[in-house]
Image: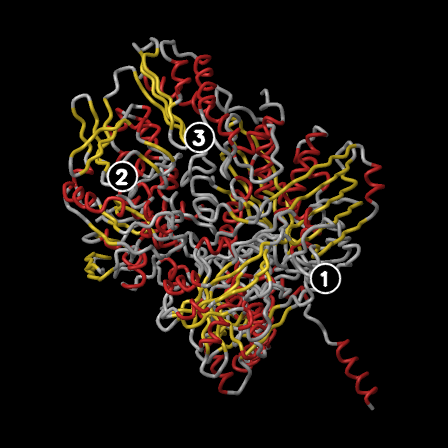
Amino acid sequence: MGDKTDKKRETKVLTKKKSDPQHLATPPRGGLSVAGQSVTRTDAVAKATGRLMFGADYSQEGFLHGKILRSPHPHAVIKSINVDKAKDLPGVAAVLTDKDVPGRNGFGAFIPDQPVICGDKVRFVGDGVALVAAQSEEIANKALELIEVDYAPLPAVFDPRDALKEDAPKIHEKGNLLAHDKLRKGDVAQGLAEADVILERIYEVPFIEHIYLEPDMIMAIPQPDGTMLVEGPMQAPFTVRRNLNAVLGVPINRVRVRQIPVGGAFGGKEDSPIDIGCRAAVLAYHTGLPVRLTLDREEVTLQTAKRHPMIMQVKIGAKKDGTLVAFEGVIYDDQGAYASLGPKIPPAGGVNVHAMIMMPGPYEIPHVKVDAYLCFTNQPYGGAMRGFGAPQVQIAHEQIIDELAAELSMNPIDIRRKNAFNLGSRTATGQVLDQSVSLRDTLEACAKDFGWDRRYRETDYIDEERTKRRGVGIGMGWYRTSIGISADACGANICVHEDGSVLLFSGITELGQGSFTVLPQICAEELGIRVEDIRLVQPDTDMVPESGPTVGSRSTTMMGNAIILAARQVKESIMEMASEMLLVPIDRLEARDRRIYDRDNPSKSLEFKAVAARCMGAGKRLIGQGWWAPPHPSLDPETGQGNPYFVYTYSTQMAEVVVDVETGEVEVTDYVAALDAGKAINPRAVEGQIEGGVAMGLGYALMEKLALDKGQIQNLHLSDYLIPTSLDIPDIKPIILEVENIYGPYGAKGIGEMSNIPAAPAILNAIANACGGRVRSLPADPEQIFRAIREAGGPPEK
Amino acid sequence: MKRNVTMTVNSKKYEVAVEPNQVLVDVLRDQLGLTGTKVGCAGGDCGSCTVIMDGKAVNSCLVLAVQANGSNILTIEGMETDQGLHPIQQAFVDKGAIQCGFCTPGLILSAKALLDQNPNPDRSEIRMAISGNLCRCTGYQKIVEAIQDASKKAPPSE
Amino acid sequence: MVLPKFEYHDPSTLDEACQIMAELKEKARPLAGGTDLLVNMRRGTVSPEHVVSLGRIEELRGIYPSNGQLRLGACLTAAEIGQSKEVNDLINPLGSGANSLGSPLIRNLATIGGNLVTARPAADLPPPLMAYGASVVLKNSSGKRAVSLDNFFRGPGQTVMEPDELLTEITVETPPPYSGGGYIKLGARKTLITSIVNVAAFLSLDDRDGTITSARVVLGAVAPVPMRAPSSEQVLLGEKPTDALFLRAGEAAAGDSKPIDDFRGSAEYRRAMVEVLTRRALNMALRKAKE
């Protein structure tokens, strides 16, 4: 009997029709009226008036203040720890060591390998060895000073290549090699043999800090019902919850996490709230009182995740005419002390594997071999930062492509034209790009607006003394929408009320990128109402479906799709009822701007809210749920072959710079960035992301670097870690292209990271073009450029 | 030992008892409840704490509250009026110059200080005036455009 | 933000301030703009028991041009100095230096006195002032003395000031006709930046197209204190200004400099930049001198 029933059930599942992706990309018949508009952001006025409250603005009344005692050593055994004096200080509510962690003493975005409180040893400067909660910050700081820790320093590792040596000190039990990801396409030896010219180069990029303007903070508040509420600025409420429940030793449904307004994140607030959240929660667990844990600017820089530094060895082979035949890459990826988001989350998630996939660039290359070694060191750990491994490798491939062009006496634009992806191209992972391939469109649009041909011809000195030389450069890149893990999916709930107002429940967070505007735009479009009719509920794990983190440029696309599906579910009721009320067949009805009308006779219409009220009165379903998962990602663990991400976006950017060839100073004087958004749901917001992304890339190219000396950060202060000011950035011209993604809401795909990635390459290439010197180890600050010019034998003659 | 400090903030007179080691931004936020002014670095390097004190835009994290005795201070809360948003605020909203919003209050104050002194700045003057305010989200592009826009509509300075 | 605790004094006259300093000596720090003091207090590098604010003392905020001299009150802000007509007319590099200090926000607080007293090797105002032979007036309850800036700095954060002294005034002799100066700051970004190297130069000619009668070259961020470049000045004195001369002067200045390696730059690069910036600052000075 079981067999027969199972067969029936199996058959049912097989014939159930999956969402036809075409419908998601297809706009309403009357065309788009809300999505696609540069609608004013829903939170703009609150931010402009200072009324919007960030975490630090919340009242501190009733809260204890939490502080973390951190290791001053990069690698050491904790021989003993004495907290007695600290505990005795008046006003101290708790001083905790490792034995006080109620559940799992480990947290991490993927692998929970970082101790909430270190017990046996510390692995980087900043590792937490004790926690304090006190009545004021001042008392908490004093208590920290009274904790006595006896360390026995261990030999430490500061370079991933050293970490791989036989005799290297072991940072974790299993050794220092956290992952070795491999990509094998074709036969790279054969490819190199066929090449007319082969270039080998090494490119290096340092630790980079997010420098979101709002320092991290978190609040852990024990609830009357025994559950724990943790709220604060964050990008990944569900990842935080998943760690909290394990650390507290309770089921997932006994923890609640709530995102509050975020003052910038860029990937950094994926990890950091897990860190301070678990610690604050443990303090709150022990004291039974609300705990507020804040980091000052230096603490943020000291202890939170970084962009991975990488040493990238590239060997590229090409024919005389510039056709690429072989690419061989080796990445030494510095993971730092803990795993965070570096290792592979199957099949294609994680920084290391993503960097590997992105490394050969958006070019058709028949033979590719990449080995990416992810290594622990006793340094700050690498997490997510805008681009997730792509910014680093794109600096490598865009520079070597330019170097190859120079070797072959080709115009940099022509070598790219020769090899750029087309529709139907096969990537290095063997994925056939079967839709939404706009790379060449971005290249040509950018070149045209920038005036590439003329400017490339006219590179020259701009002053009589011949100290300042102008040059131009291209950065061309690609980036995924989604994160390449099997669990990648989004869900949304929509509740329509009898007065036409709507609640939208989505787990995607607003970081400044505009999600709290764009997602309601999609909802309003699909329901046929206005953005102001929708209240997007503050993401709260008790209230919104688990939807993954706000990362990987996935939000607009994946949550947008879920919202469309949820809206359609509610719309079924609305349209059925409207059809009954108007006596018009349902397939003739349109919903737009709060009205539902007969397409053939538009004056025959009803107000949306009137129909909603009737539905409520008739017991008709007014709640919709949408769930959207992309086509399953795949990637062979041995060969790196598969379809890791379901759609890519593309961007070409061009920079003009003037280099002072005597000092190495650079001014970026002009900039054009063309980016394909699939469909810009809010064009002004897309422009804002392009402009901000370019600025961040400019910083990466010219001035950003965490200087470490034996694991100690030398430039913790914001006066010493430099990001661009308004005087360092030129006017940026953004160009938005729209090449439809069939798997996206009205054709959209993600853009938040793509905007950032080609900027550093474009500027680095422009610098080389201007002064003849090429900087291969970032940042290209004045000294590095000065040295590069000297290495090149001096600045160009003409 | 606490001191009594009198200051006029957003046209309202306040008298507060402060410790000498309290900085102005903390007193504005914690004692006067004016949390619109933000703390991004507490070291004068980011401008998130910008207020206008006696007509000059300053980092309020570098001013002791006791030094502000007798001064006239404008914070973001004092920008809008009964008639609505100040033209600078409106321009920021309309031009998409706000993303995460953390740097926004400081920038609006720096813009006000600029336009009070120089009602028709060119773009390079605008960039110079806001060069002490860091923004990580916007690339400054739309901020410069918003300030330029507002300069065409701003009322004469008080 | 938690600053260490201290007692606060805010005298309304200079005499009152001197009295307080006489009593408290090294237990007290004077407070002007606070842009260095508060930062250092927060970082824990300094923790005074007493802070003496100079903010109420009006006479410290004046600009007093007088016979053959320009006197600048120590509590003039960098913004006031940078925007001052007198300063820009008479000591143009000081105006440039003031305008490149910090950010527009910092400049509204930071003072010329503070920039000198904090004595950072890379500070913006000492080189232009030293290039014009400036001196400072140090006052205490028993009197006052003038000290040439050439002899004022002793090391990073250290000056010749006694614990009970206040820096009240900066004095610059009016430069002769056919003279001018230049100040150049090299940094890793355009503003809000500590110099990698900075250079100020002053030239005085015996007439518009004549020879150099007086030359000063001052280097910042390449020694424990802002320093004169004597070899460079030697090269210049008595010569007619030419490109070749300035090239040699630049090389000589580089030879005088004593830079170190730090996370902002290497000694080698700094030395090379002293050469370039000296040459350029001399050209600026020459252009001004000929105006």
Quadrant assignment, res A63? bottom left
Label tally: 3
Report the disc number at residue A347: 1
The chain containing the residue under callout 1 comes to A
Question: Is C161 left or right of A286, judged from the image as shown?
Answer: left
Residue at image location 61% in from the left, 44% down from the top:
A205
The answer to whether residue A753 of the structure is visible from this angle is no
Label 1 packing within 10 angstroms: few (<14), some (14-19), many (20+): many
Which of the two residues, A768 or A74, is positioned nearer the viewer here?
Answer: A74
Q: Is residue B61 visible?
A: yes
Marks 3 & 2 on one chain:
yes
Q: Toward the viewer: A203 or A71?
A: A71
Q: Residues within 10 Å of mark 2 (few under 14, many from 20)?
A: many
For badge 1, the amino acid type reads Pro
Identify the disc placed on residue C222.
3
Q: Residue A717: image x %, image y %?
A: 44, 48
Element type at mark 2:
loop
Q: Nearer the viewer, mark 3 or mark 1?
A: 3
Query: Mark 2 sits on what residue?
Result: C77
C91 to A586, vertically: above or below: above
Above-or-below relation of B60 to A274: above
